[in-house]
Amino acid sequence: MNDRESEADPEAASERAREFREQRELLNKIVLDNSGLTMKRFFNLDTQAYTDGALSTKTKELLGLVSSLVLRCDDCTMYHLLRCFEKGVSDQEFEETMSIGLVVGGSITIPHIRRAFKAWVELRRGKGE
C-alpha cells in the first residue's frame, strides 16, 4: 500500500462494513421469506459452494472476489472482499487477486478496483471491527 492510505477512514470503513452486512442479511431474509423452493435451493447452493473442500474457504472467497470484479458487481465484490478480510487474506494476496481481475476483465474493471482498494485499505486500517 502507499501514502494515499492516510486518506482512508478506518472508523467509517468499519461502520460501512457493518451496515453492508446488516443490509445484506435483511435483504436475504426478505427474499427467502418470500420465495419458493428454487430460490431457496440456489441460496443454499451458493452458501455450500464456499465451504472447505479440495479448495479452502479462503481460496474460494478469492475466486469469488475476482469473479465479482470481472462481472463488475459492486455488492458482490464488497461481500467477497469482506469475507476475504475475515479469512485472513494478506495485502499481497488481495493485490494479486485484483491484478488477475484486471487482466481478465480489462480496463473496464478499474473503477471497481479503485473502490475495492479503498475498502480494503480502510478495513486494514480499522481492522474490520
Image: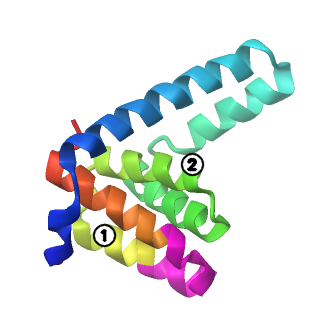
Q: Circle 2 sits in a helix, a strand or a loop, which is it? A: helix
Q: Is residue 110 magenta?
A: yes
Left or right: 23 in relation to 14: right
Which residue lies at the image location 21% right of the left edge and 64% below the top edge? 7
Q: Is residue 90 magenta?
A: no
- Return the residue found at the far front: 7
How many other residues sit within 10 Å of disc 1, few (<14), some (14-19) or many (≥20)?
Answer: some
Quadrant of the image occupied by residue 48: top right
Kindly identify which residue carries mark 2: 75
Left or right: 74 in relation to 17: right
Sequence order check, earlier mark of 1 and 2: 2
Which residue lies at the image location 66% right of the left edge and 30% below the top edge? 44
Quarter placement of the N terminus: bottom left
Quarter placement of the C terminus: top left
Q: Is residue 111 depicted above or below 59 in this figure?
A: below
Q: In the rendered structure, which amino acid carries the disc numbered 2?
A: Asp
Q: Main secondary structure of the magenta part?
A: helix
Q: Is residue 95 depicted above or below 88 in this figure?
A: below
Residue 78 appears at what percent x and percent y?
47, 51
Residue range corresponding to the magenta coloring:
99-112
The disc label shown at residue 23, or none: none
Q: In the rendered structure, which amino acid carries the disc numbered 1?
A: Glu
The disc label shown at residue 93, or none: 1
Q: Contact (CB < 8 A) between labels 1 and 2?
A: no
Q: Closer to us: mark 1 or mark 2?
A: 2
Residue 83 appears at what percent x and percent y?
39, 45
Residue nearest the viewer, comparing 116 with 50: 116
Q: In this orientation, does residue 97 appear? A: yes
